[in-house]
Amino acid sequence: MELKTTQALETYLSTKKIPFDKVTELPGGSANFIWRVQSAGERDTIIKHAEPYIKVAPQMGFPAERMDFETNVIRLLNSALALKHGSPGTHGDSTVTAKITVALPTIYWYDHEQHVIQMNYAGPRNLKEAYQDPSLNMTAYGNQIGAWLANLHESTKSTNIGDNNSAKEMYRFGYQRLERALKEMGFDGALGAQINDKYGAMLLTDDECVCHGDCWSGNLLVSEDQSTLTVVDWEMTRRGCGATDVGQFAAEAYLLDVFKGSRGLMESFLQAYKKNTDMSEEFVGRLAVHFAMHICFWPTRVPWGSPEQTKELVQVGVDILTAVEAQDWNKLRGSVLRDVFVGFK
């Protein structure tokens, strides 16, 4: 049964005896079909459904079993993220500071055959959409997200979630296209090929901890009372290197800070992550590479500013990639990632 339209979903809900008064397909989200379900006297819920391809690019296959990984990892993390010995500022599957909580979704029901998840409705906006809201404290949010992500990586070093091979391949997307993007922007494409061969290939064998796999501001939902950030879209989860999660979130936070108001999201996030875990030289190098790859590639496909501003972004990324390859720690300490590299060499 294909569930690609609201009418089809309503028929499906009726057959499953799931009550509803109103079903609304939600905008955003490139991979899956998502609806908000409202029913009188009940809490609103979200229905998420996967077809064996990317919703906005049906020609790109993406196994629907990704929903299995999402469901399983959320259930596993409910226990794995409970910090040992009741560390201050934490509670179960969430991290709490200054009345801001970072939490996992609550899964009510999963249809394995149809790849349909029913989960809690976590809020009307994601963090990217809410970034410019003056009533939100972006520094406090950054602190919380950094602490929560460090907890995820530290707490799941031995957590087995299976081998999500399709997520590993998908996550290499930007690395595999970095050479072309650099050439298009007037830079040396050979650097992109070198980065893909060296670091893109590592994504297939990294096995340090559980990674979210698509960790950016668009996958954190802000609750209506602004007190809770819910981390959603876990279908790209995999065992890997936590530095890639950190680099991706930092890159998207940097873009928000540069183009949407300079509210300190990246700085507070990186400082909090660093404070809550031990980072090796290898780890910060991987973090920097992933950050730089992201701002070199993705703004050339999803523009944030003018062509001139895009080229400036790519230059920032190229400078970081070149410095990492040259092990030029002085240059890295003077880069936009200075908070990460303070204290190294």
Image: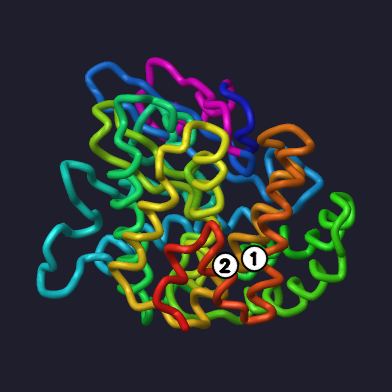
Q: Could you say where residue 235 lies in the image, as x and y percent from the top left?
A: 53, 55
- The residue where tag 1 is placed is 320
Q: Is residue 91 above or below residue 218?
A: below
Describe residue 151's horizontal placement relative to residue 255 as left or right.
left
Badge 2 density bin: few <14, some 14–19, many ≥20, Cα 10 Å: many
Q: CA distance from mark 1 to mark 2?
A: 7 Å
Stretch of the chain drawn in magenta: 7-29
- Residue 185 visible here: yes
Q: Could you say where residue 295 lies in the image, as x and y percent from the top left?
A: 66, 52
- Could you say which is closer to the camera, residue 290 or residue 109? 290
Badge 1 density bin: few <14, some 14–19, many ≥20, Cα 10 Å: many
Describe residue 257's horizontal placement relative to residue 120 as left or right.
right
Residue type at mark 1 is Ile
- Residue 108 visible here: no
Describe residue 212's horizontal placement relative to residue 94 as left or right.
right
Q: Is residue 22 above or below residue 115?
A: above
Q: Quadrant of the N terminus?
A: top right
Label 2 SS: helix
N-terminal label among 1 and 2: 2
Q: Is residue 131 above or below residue 175?
A: above
- The residue where tag 2 is placed is 288
